[in-house]
Amino acid sequence: MDKYAVIGHPIGHSKSPRIHALFAEQTGQDMAYEAVLAPLDGFADTVCRLVGEGYRGFNVTVPFKGEAFELADALTDRARRAGAVNTLKVQADGALLGENTDGVGLVTDLVNNLGVAIAGRDLVVLGAGGAVRGVLAPLLALGPASLHIANRTGARAEQLAQDFADLGPVTGGDLDSLKGRQAHVLINGTSAGLDDEVPALPDDLLHVDGGCYDMMYGDRPTAFLRWAAAHDAAWTADGLGMLVEQAAESFALWRGVRPQTGPVIRTLRPVQP
Ligand code: ATR
């Protein structure tokens, strides 16, 4: 039986083993998938050991996506752009191929599952860390009218905008740069939600048809999605769909079969009271 794992630190609450077990069952693939805790200074050693034990591929999560990027023997274009790897595939000769499926996961959830239009729309993305870097290329590929990155530390957003300027109309600035803007699609890629916080946003940031997507998810609505509801967002979504879609892309890379994601998202979605 082929073996796979998600590697992170911490890893206890990862939903990936459940998602991949559901995919394997649905597609009839004979495989095992487990969560592995790597020591903070032992990511590369852990990968080497597991490859030696015959593992065929890995998902990589916080805080190792940058190290996985360094460790990969070859990179896909989107992993190179993202500067981070969330999927490793052990190739026939033992070499490690690095891929990043986070951005395509977000875009698939937005477009296929939620029916959100991106082409010709004004997008605002909050945050300028690794999570945001990973999604910019797939978002720009859909042809938005504009994509503005706003971050607490404005210089990081400006740098990101510069790095992706060849791919589309992208700008960056601090949170004050949001004044006077109207977003059709407002995406939260900050980690402020971990502290149940929202970056300071203008009250009129959302276009009248504008909706809000939080790349994070939780069993309760996140602080950002509570902000969205209080500001009459036309639609809201958390990152559960993105999580399942990025997993489906990894699964397809490893197994050559793309599972159906809708039933898995519905199975994992907590029942709202
Ligand atoms: P990740 O890889 O998850 O993106 P990161 O690189 O640490 O993690 O980035 C976290 C992002 O969340 C950053 O954009 C950070 O803003 P700064 O660049 O100014 O640090 C943002 N962030 C975290 N906590 C925040 C808060 N309480 N309010 C606003 N932004 C916050």
Image (spheres, rainbow, N blue to C red):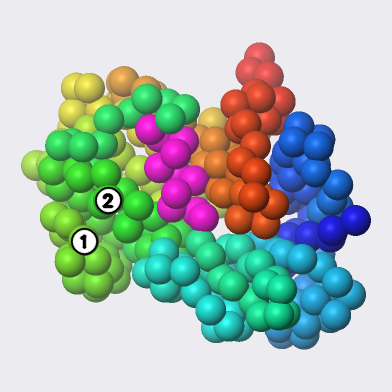
Please state the extent of the stretch shown in magenta in the rendering: 101-111
**Quarter of the C terminus within the rendering:** top right
Q: Which mark is residue 167?
A: 1
Is 99 displayed left or right of 10 in the figure?
Answer: left
Q: Amino acid at mark 2?
A: Ala
Against 271, is 105 above or below?
below
| Nearer to the camera, 15 or 262 | 262
Left or right, 45 with reference to 163 = right
Label for residue 141? 2
The answer to whether residue 109 is seen in the rendering is yes
Residue that lies at the very extreme toward the top in this rendered image:
273
Q: Are marks 1 and 2 in contact (CB under 8 Å)?
A: yes
The x, y position of residue 154, in whole percent, is 24, 66
Q: Residue visible at 25% across and 56% down? A: 149
> Dot 1, how many residues are within 10 Å of its Cα: few (below 14), some (14-19), or many (20+)?
some
Q: Secondary structure at mark 2?
A: loop
Residue that appears at 46% across and 36% down: 109
Q: What percent of the width, then of the height, locates residue 147?
A: 20, 50
Secondary element under disc 1, as helix, strand or loop, is helix
Quick one: label 1 or label 2, which is nearer the N terminus? Answer: 2
